[in-house]
Image: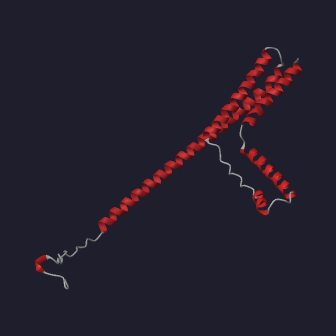
């Protein structure tokens, strides 16, 4: 009976580990299989001499792998919540199995230790996140202060330049007579 429970516990632990891996769409794994598939198609095309050179060149071209983006903060938090929930459920399941007498007490040690380790890592991650947010906020405040001092200096320099500016008087503009061909019976030459 206890060996059956042990096997069930092992299956449960592996399910907690493997099911999220199967459900997660890992771009690295997809990229690996895509490259492997391209290599296999290249080997097949090399063996077939009937393909024209143009088709061979298009098959030989390997598309550049897409650059990996760092997951956003929301994705990281969601992943942490899923992992915490899974480990908590595993620990509760082991406690329930022990309480019903289906397994010895030591069956609960691995899930409880995993949960404790995960929670301690979460504490460290929260501290690191808080330090990063604090550093970003200080950096934003420093940039705002630098921009404000630069604007104040520009205003002061403009004010000093306005005080030092020399005022030049322009000669009055004399009105020029505009020629109107129809005024005062004057005609244009040749008209």
Farthest residue to the bottom: give it: 190
Farthest residue to the front: give it: 191
Farthest residue to the top: give it: 100
The image quadrant that residue 75 belongs to is top right
Q: Is residue 94 left or right of residue 85?
A: right
Count of all numbered marks drawn on residues in the image: 0
Q: Nearer the viewer, residue 184 or 144?
A: 184
Of the 4 image quadrants, the one containing the N terminus is top right
Residue that appears at 33% across and 64% down: 160
Q: Is residue 162 above or below residue 22?
A: below
Q: Nearer the viewer, residue 4 or 48?
A: 48
Residue that appears at 20% across and 85% down: 190
Which x, y percent locates residue 28?
A: 74, 46
Of the 4 image quadrants, the one containing the C terminus is bottom left
The image quadrant that residue 114 belongs to is top right
Q: Is residue 34 above or below residue 161?
A: above
Residue that appears at 77% across and 59% down: 55
Residue that appears at 61% across and 40% down: 73
Which x, y percent locates residue 37?
A: 80, 49
Q: Is residue 32 above or below residue 3?
A: below
């Amino acid at each position: 009976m206890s060996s059956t429970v042990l096997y069930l516990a092992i299956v449960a632990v592996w399910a907690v580990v493997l099911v999220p891996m199967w459900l997660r769409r890992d771009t690295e794994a997809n990229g690996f299989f895509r490259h492997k598939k391209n290599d296999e198609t290249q080997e097949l095309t090399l063996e077939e001499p009937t393909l024209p050179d143009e088709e061979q060149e298009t098959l030989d071209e390997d598309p550049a792998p897409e650059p990996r983006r760092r997951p956003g903060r929301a994705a990281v938090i969601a992943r942490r919540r899923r992992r915490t929930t899974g480990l908590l459920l595993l620990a509760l399941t082991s406690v329930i199995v022990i309480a019903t007498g289906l397994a010895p007490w030591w069956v609960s040690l691995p899930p409880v230790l995993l949960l404790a380790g995960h929670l301690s890592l979460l504490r460290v991650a929260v501290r690191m996140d808080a330090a990063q947010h604090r550093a970003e906020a200080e950096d934003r405040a420093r940039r705002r202060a630098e921009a404000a001092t630069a604007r104040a200096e520009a205003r002061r320099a403009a004010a000093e330049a306005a005080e030092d500016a020399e005022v030049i008087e322009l000669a009055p503009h004399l009105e020029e007579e505009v020629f109107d061909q129809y005024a005062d019976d004057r005609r244009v030459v040749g008209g």
